[in-house]
Image (spheres, coloured by chain):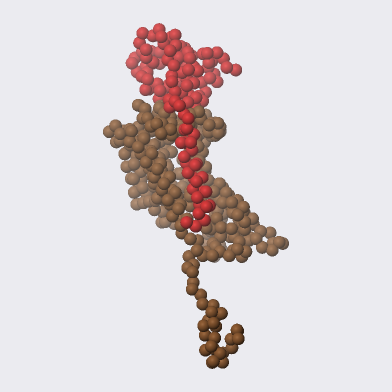
Amino acid sequence: MYNGSKVLVGLGLFFLIVTVPFWLGFGTEELAPELDLDTPAIAQLADKKCIEPTGVMREEHMQLLEQWRDQAVRMGNRYYEASDGTVYQASLQNTCLDCHSNKSDFCDRCHDYGKVSPDCWTCHLDPEGMEL
Amino acid sequence: MAILISLLVTLVLVAVPILGVAAGAEYVLGVVLPYLAFLVFVVGFILRVVRWASSPVPFHITLTGGQQRSLSWIKGSKLDNPSTTLGVVGRMALEVLCFRSLFRNVKTELHPEGKLSYRWEKWLWLFGLALHWSLLIILIRHLRFFTEPVPFLVGWLESLDGLFRFGYQAFYITDLLIVLALTFLFLRRVVVARLKYISLSADYFPLFLLGGIATTGILMKYVSKVDIASIKELALGFATFRPVVPEGIGTIFYIHLFLVCVLMAYFPFSKLMHMGGIFLSPTRNLANNSRAVRHVNPWNYPVDVHTYEEYEDEFREKMVAAGIPVEKG
């Protein structure tokens, strides 16, 4: 190999950079966030289920909320018929946060984990108190 | 034909994870293949560079894009035609970060009346730069899936990239840029006849592959949602060597991941190696000091020389006898 030292320094840098995820992964204890479903409202529910199946909620809750916003604010339609036929009030404040009143142990867990910053709280009040 | 083949290959590659998920091979798609592909990428990349570094540079072939260092009253071009190592580093940085050589691009036209004209042509530079910087930023942004907590720099870059909003969430400028750039780079090869003539499957395939990765990524972000938390769990498992495959991740994610695996495994064997190759380009990484420093061709084998002194020593008596003048009595 010609210019061996220079090439090796370059390759060493290459290796360090492409393996960055592994270096940063050292010391990571928990792989997944724990969601806290233990709120007074949920404890009182006879049938402990969300408005749609868990899988759907995990994947599409943001789209549902956006759809709710559009239909409530633009069309004045404040009701949502779930896939099982139950009709709910289409409201983050009055429906979602009624049960999930623990924003910091529910919403924020995944949002912080996935580094997503949704715009919900620029209009809506944090159920656990205003953060200003 | 080359376009068709690359497109077909890409479509087949999209079909593989769909069938794989249907057959329940999530572990293979989500854990085994990513590790294998990453290994092929790193080892293949290093071996390829070592192989390149093993071939000697016979001549000092600097490209002279400016005035060479000369007499003190002639202004030299320190970055375009460097004579020092520092200058070479500067030129390389300019090349890698700003695509200096592409910026030189002009369109040469010969007009019917015999006039030659050079026209401003920076589109390739512009879209090439947009593509590469978008790729880098998108790659760094993806670190949010591999780290917990997410490093400050990654979050900062993401908020900058997501300055615009789409519904409730960030709209990434790089998502738009990469699609525009890939479209341009593809159309360029299709529309310009002489480019189409020299374009091979190996030119179209990376474009389609990157296009497929970008498309599935964009679809997951804006259209067909996937469970980000589960995906991060998978990615963190990958980064911490504790592989897990959480239930209920959408097929589209596995398509995305599989195409990325193909890209990684394909990388060391393809034109994409220009990532490492740019640093080994003799025309870019040699200082133009050939008038000051002698460049010895490493190919030169040791030549058996027979100097005149040795010759004279050998034949002195015969030379003297024949009356030929000698240097040593």
Whole-percent x, y for residue A40 in the image: 44, 8
Whole-percent x, y for residue A47 in the image: 35, 10
Extreme right residue here?
A: B73
| Chain A representation colour | red
Whole-percent x, y for residue B5 in the image: 34, 49
Query: Is residue B224 placed above or below B206 in the rendered structure?
Result: above
Query: Is residue A19 placed above or below B88 in the rendered structure?
Result: above
Tell which of B311 and A25 is nearer to you: B311
Q: Is residue B7 visible?
A: yes
Q: Is residue A96 left or right of residue A129?
A: left
The image quarter in which residue A79 lies: top left
The chain coloured brown in the image: B
Q: Residue at x 43, y 12 (%)?
A: A38
Whole-percent x, y for residue B110 in the image: 52, 62
Q: Is residue B61 left or right of residue B253?
A: right
Q: Residue at x 48, y 38 (%)?
A: A20
Q: Residue at x 49, y 72 (%)?
A: B303
